[in-house]
Structures are given as structure tokens and as C-alpha cells.
Image (cartoon, rainbow, N blue to C red):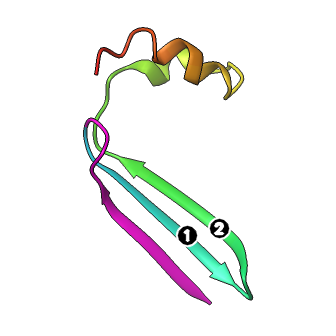
Amino acid sequence: MSTIVIDPISRIEGHLKIEVVVEGGEVKETRSSGTLFRGFELFLRGRAPFDAQFLVQRICGV
């Protein structure tokens, strides 16, 4: 079992870290963490994940 860590991902606003656990050539677990809170998460709660790309890109401003 091996863990791949990509930290920092710097081509975004804020800071993002991705961790992937690989076992036998298959991804078994993934985690992401970010330190920038813009509040988008609040109005995306309960919506389909695919809604985020259409709603956030129109208001982000980055």
C-alpha cells in the first residue's frame, strides 16, 4: 500500500492538498483538504455535485 500526496496544489485560489491511497494498483481511498473558505459550500449543500461547476464559475471572480 502506498500513499500519494500532492501538496500544495497552487493553480487555484487558496491552498489545496490531495492524498490518494493506492493498493494493488487500485485507488482505495482519497482525501482532499483546503484552507480557503469562500462560503460556496453553504449554498451548495444538498445539491447535486455537478451543480457546483455551473454555479460557482459564474460568481467566483478568480
Quadrant of the image containing the C terminus: top left
Q: Residues within 10 Å of mark 2 (few under 14, many from 20)?
A: few
Q: SS class of the residue under badge 2? A: strand
Figure quadrant of residue 18 = bottom left
Q: SS class of the residue under badge 1? A: strand
Horizontal side of 41 relative to 2 (left or right) equals left
Horizontal and vertical percent for residue 17?
A: 38, 57
Residue lying at 58% horizontally and 16% vertically, measured from the top left: 54
Horizontal side of 18 relative to 54 (left or right) equals left
- Labels 2 and 1 touching (C-beta < 8 A): yes
Amino acid under disc 2: Glu
Amino acid under disc 1: Val
Q: Main secondary structure of the magenta part?
A: strand
Magenta range is: 1-13
Horizontal side of 1 relative to 25 (left or right) equals left
Horizontal and vertical percent for residue 21?
A: 59, 75
- Return the mark for residue 29: 2
